[in-house]
Image (cartoon, rainbow, N blue to C red):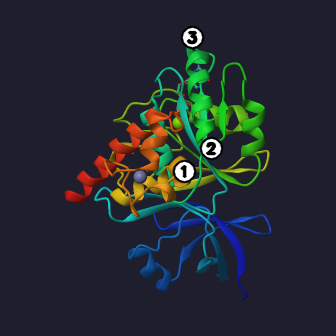
Amino acid sequence: MSSVRGTVRETGGGVYVVALDGGRSVEASIRGRLRQEARTGGRIVVGDHVRVSRSGSAWTIDEVEARRTVLARRGRSGRTAKVLAANLDRVFVVVALREPPATPHLIDRLLVLVESSGMHPSLVLNKADLPGAPDVARTLAPLYESVGYQVFVASVETGQGMPALTDAFCSGASALIGPSGVGKSSLLNAIDPGLELRTGVLSRKTGTGRHTTVGSRLIELSCGGLVADTPGFGDVGLWSVSPDAVADCFPDFASLRDECRFRGCAHVREPECAVRRAVEEGRVPASRYESYLALRAEAMDAEAR
Ligand SMILES: Nc1nc2c(ncn2[C@@H]2O[C@H](COP(=O)(O)OP(=O)(O)O)[C@@H](O)[C@H]2O)c(=O)[nH]1
Ligand SMILES: [Mg+2]
Ligand SMILES: [Zn+2]
């Protein structure tokens, strides 16, 4: 039988739910050769475009198409990247302005995490309704806009920012990453009330909301967009990028790099460093540079281990 094209919507336990281009979904397993590749790192992930074929009632994934984008995180050892989702159009870094309060360092860490997999995220500053939150937003939003990120100031409570976010989520495929408790599930429920994702603080031990599994899935919103629900971005303290690659994850440094006196300048104590000059002159926020130094030092520690 000829093969059909589709998109992987759910993975876990060796079973893959594939949405066929015609509309219906089937459960598929993978061919021996692909299974071999999966063990050596070429896993099939949500968002992968695949070709499947049927023999009797059983569907099999025969082929995986080249990926347009990948969202990956480094393994605990720091060396191997683990791909979490493929072919995403947008990634949103979500933090709360209050409860729990975001710091520039946390935001920078999350942005770098996404940049290190080659994607350029947007930033959502949620809970703008809480007392004091607008003041924090007035500092953070222009800071990250000046760096070149699109910023959404949002509140699930008042609906602030929700039309713009709904627009962004209702086309293509997206992912949200951020600490727990910042309102990721609440934002999705506000965009599509039919989702009924569990919200609120969940105990670490019992785990888990209704939908939390070892696997990943792409949720289809009623407005047509897809949203990745992937475990694996929770432990943001455990990633590692090679020290020299950290600067590449700061887009505000990229245009300055060529003006540094030394090629391969690490922007730490080299003379005539354009990044340090820009920080001194206030063209690059000091908090960005502090985050850079901290994340670079962390990357060096991880490499030495
Ligand atoms: N005041 C306020 N609370 C919010 C907002 N968004 C979410 N919350 C609350 O924050 C808590 C955590 O939200 P949840 O969506 O579970 O966060 P997640 O862990 O990132 O998915 C819940 O108690 C929500 O009701 C918001 O915009 N304003
Ligand atoms: Mg949640
Ligand atoms: Zn430099």
Residue appearing at x 67%, y 56% in the figure: 89
Identify the element where label 1 is drawn. Answer: helix
State which mark lies toward you, 2 or 3.
2
User: In the image, what residue type sits under mark 3?
Assistant: Pro
Q: Quadrant of ligand 1?
A: top right
Residue appearing at x 42%, y 40% in the figure: 289
Residue appearing at x 78%, y 64% in the figure: 23
Residue appearing at x 47%, y 23% in the figure: 101
Identify the element where label 2 is drawn. Answer: loop
Does residue 280 appear left or right of residue 18 in this picture?
left
Q: Report the residue marked by disc 3.
A: 131
Q: Which mark is residue 87?
A: none
Q: Report the residue marked by disc 2.
A: 148
User: In the image, what residue type sits under mark 1?
Assistant: Pro
Q: Report the residue marked by disc 1.
A: 251
In depth, the one of 274 and 250 nearer the eye is 274
Where does the image place residue 99, in percent across and percent down from the top left? 48, 20
